[in-house]
Image (cartoon, grey):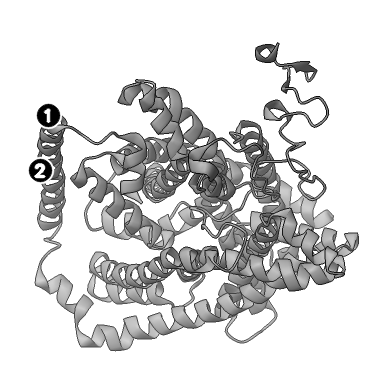
């Protein structure tokens, strides 16, 4: 990816530039190594503290007892909550995501309100509430269920929006072809559009899996005995919390990193099965009406027809992707995109028009 | 209804939200600066900078925020004696800001990078063909379009940051919303649902306008191709 962006920004460097890059490269490398050495020195000899690198502190954080009694049970609790939350989130997301698309206005409205509410409330606030509430009602293991249900509600609402924007990002032709074959709107939605949306959202859903795994660590605040909580307990026994946190951090990192690699590998595979862009976003869509730039990236990467000549019309994606208002109702007509009049060839006059600042349509001065 | 009124009389809920907004403001500022530095390093032709920035982003993207916050207090403060102030409250506030900023900077960097991805290669090629040098093509052609393309992910990052500011509870910031909510539930378990609704709708009221503004701006500023 980085090479691609450099190609966008930089020319192929000549010999003088190559020399300069080499020098800066070494200077920067030396600076980074110096910073790393300074951090290690600080760890070795912190002001009025003990040496953090001594084996005495690291041994109880790494020996077999620590793994058997603390890390592994904690990891099991983390993974248990993650798996259940992921399954719940996918079910919740599919139900509410499809619910937000079907023609019935009441169902759509209710699903919309539920999703927007669950997306806006911080997960920790939900967790604390459910934890106390379940304990209040004498349910078994309130912390575990609080973690699972909060994660289902938040991540499920994100999955629901991924379903909706996946359907929204499909070209109109998919829906039109389904209707032309005699399918009803709901049939077209369920048998043509939603399946493609699911393929398109796969990479983003795996990225969301990383979020679920990371967010289970919030459970330690409500005393759920997950990996983080267990490492804190171990650390408070031997006064080596820094060391046990590092071990827990490494475990979290390895798990999340493997899932992230999977999410990076998926888009290419999934793109073959869907007409909607399968690129995951850097941050899950949380803003209302989920603006995103995935379609802009898809358009930027698209091969230009006829050896790079300008298209006569826009590649029109519906979708809330911040490219058009009122995305469900606007329709693209061959050669003219009503949402983008400023750069369009008018259908009637075969003449360039563009909108002035005050909204008036006036003829293009270049054409006269 | 009486429950709501008595809760507002008994506890200063707006003050708690103000603490979260302050955390968000300072973290947004610092993470924006750090994120811009990171993305510049990440797209530079200098390999060592690219790898360090890539490693930083990869590290914080795959690390739970809670563990970073706990680390700031129990690791960096208690064991490494990193301290901002002798006053505990101020100290924990700034430790939380540091944790949030370090974490969010990785996402700011990713958002800006995805903005650069919205610019087709043809734009840079055309700029070069017209004889613009690197600085000219970067500042006149590529960056203005890339910034417009990154409005949406940056808005999502800001909302995520505001919601994440509740995790400052893990860094012992006792005055922010999730801590206040715990305290209120402890003393008034009879009105637990009302307490939850107060905080939940507080966040809904804060977040929906940011979301609408993000959508409006990215819609308004999107480059039509």
The picture quadrant where one finds residue A179 is: bottom right
In the image: residue B49, left or right of residue B196:
left
Relative to A355, is A341 above or below? below
Q: Position of residue B16 (x, y in %)?
A: 58, 46
At a point 58% along the width and 62% down the height, the residue shown is: A123
Q: Position of residue B108 (x, y in %)?
A: 44, 44
Whole-angstrom CA distance, mark 1 to mark 2, is 22 Å
Q: Is residue A72 visible?
A: yes
Q: Chain of mark 2?
A: A
Q: Which residue is mark 2?
A: A30
Q: Chain of mark 1?
A: A
At a point 47% along the width and 39% down the height, the residue shown is: B120
The picture quadrant where one finds residue A260 is: bottom left
Relative to B34, is A42 above or below? below
Front residue of A190 and A301? A301
Query: Which numbered circle lies on residue A16?
Result: 1
Mark before the other along the chain sequence, 1 or 2 = 1
Q: What secondary structure is marked by label 1?
A: helix
Alpha-carbon neighbours of circle 2 within 10 Å: few (<14), some, or many (≥20)? Answer: few
At a point 12% along the width and 48% down the height, the residue shown is: A33
Q: Is residue B12 visible?
A: no
Q: What secondary structure is marked by label 2?
A: helix
Query: Which mark is nearer the camera, 1 or 2?
Result: 1
User: How many numbered badges does the structure rendering display?
Assistant: 2
Front residue of A327 and A344? A344
Q: Position of residue B37 (x, y in %)?
A: 32, 37
Relative to B206, is A193 above or below? below
């Amino acid at each position: 990816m980085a090479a691609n962006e450099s190609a966008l920004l930089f020319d192929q460097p000549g010999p003088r530039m190559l020399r300069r890059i080499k020098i800066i490269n070494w200077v920067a490398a030396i600076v980074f190594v110096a910073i790393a050495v300074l951090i290690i020195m600080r760890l070795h000899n912190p002001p009025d503290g003990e040496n953090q690198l001594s084996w005495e502190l690291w041994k109880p954080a790494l020996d077999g007892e620590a793994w058997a009694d603390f890390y592994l049970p904690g990891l099991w609790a983390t993974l248990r909550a993650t798996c259940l939350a992921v399954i719940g989130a996918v079910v919740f997301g599919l139900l509410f995501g499809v619910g937000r698309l079907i023609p019935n206005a009441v169902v759509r409205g209710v699903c919309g309100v539920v999703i927007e509410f669950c997306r806006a409330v911080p997960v920790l606030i939900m967790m604390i509430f459910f934890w106390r509430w379940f304990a209040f009602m004498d349910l078994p293991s309130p912390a575990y269920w609080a973690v699972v249900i909060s994660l289902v509600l938040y991540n499920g609402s994100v999955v629901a929006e991924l379903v909706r924007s996946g359907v929204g990002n499909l070209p109109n032709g998919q829906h039109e072809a389904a209707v032309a074959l005699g399918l009803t709107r709901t049939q077209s939605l369920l048998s043509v559009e939603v399946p493609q949306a699911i393929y398109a959202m796969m990479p983003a859903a795996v990225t969301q899996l990383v979020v679920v795994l990371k967010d289970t660590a919030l459970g330690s605040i409500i005393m759920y005995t997950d990996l983080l909580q267990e490492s804190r307990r171990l650390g408070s026994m031997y006064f080596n919390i820094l060391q046990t946190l590092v071990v827990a951090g490494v475990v979290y990192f390895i798990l999340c990193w493997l899932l992230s690699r999977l999410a990076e590998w998926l888009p290419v595979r999934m793109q073959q099965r869907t007409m909607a862009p399968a690129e995951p976003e850097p941050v899950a869509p949380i803003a209302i009406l989920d603006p995103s730039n995935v379609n802009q990236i898809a358009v930027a990467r698209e091969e230009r027809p006829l050896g790079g000549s300008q298209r006569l019309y826009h590649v029109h994606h519906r979708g809330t992707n911040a490219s058009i208002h009122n995305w469900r109702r606007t329709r693209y007509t061959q050669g003219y995109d009503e949402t983008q009049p400023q750069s369009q060839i008018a259908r009637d006059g075969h003449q360039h028009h563009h909108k002035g600042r005050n909204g008036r349509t006036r003829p293009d001065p270049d054409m006269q | 209804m009486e429950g709501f009124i008595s809760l507002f009389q008994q506890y200063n809920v707006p003050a708690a939200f103000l603490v979260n907004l302050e955390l968000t403001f300072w973290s947004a500022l610092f993470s924006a600066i750090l994120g811009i530095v990171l993305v510049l390093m990440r797209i530079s032709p200098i390999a060592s900078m690219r790898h360090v920035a890539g490693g930083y982003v990869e590290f914080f993207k795959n690390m739970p925020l809670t563990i970073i916050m706990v680390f700031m207090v129990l690791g960096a403060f208690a064991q490494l004696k990193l301290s901002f102030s002798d006053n505990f409250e101020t100290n924990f506030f700034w430790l939380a800001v540091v944790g949030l900023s370090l974490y969010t900077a990785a996402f700011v960097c990713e958002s800006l990078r995805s903005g650069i991805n919205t610019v087709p290669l043809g734009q840079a090629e055309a700029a070069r063909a017209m004889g613009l040098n690197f600085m000219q093509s970067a500042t006149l052609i590529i960056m203005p379009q890339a910034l417009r393309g990154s409005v949406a992910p940056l808005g999502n990052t800001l909302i995520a940051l505001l919601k994440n500011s509740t995790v400052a509870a893990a860094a012992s910031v006792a005055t922010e919303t999730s801590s206040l909510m715990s305290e209120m539930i402890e003393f008034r378990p009879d009105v637990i649902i009302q307490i939850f609704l107060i905080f939940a709708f507080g966040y809904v009221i804060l977040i929906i306008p940011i979301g609408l503004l993000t959508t409006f701006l990215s819609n308004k500023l999107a480059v039509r191709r």
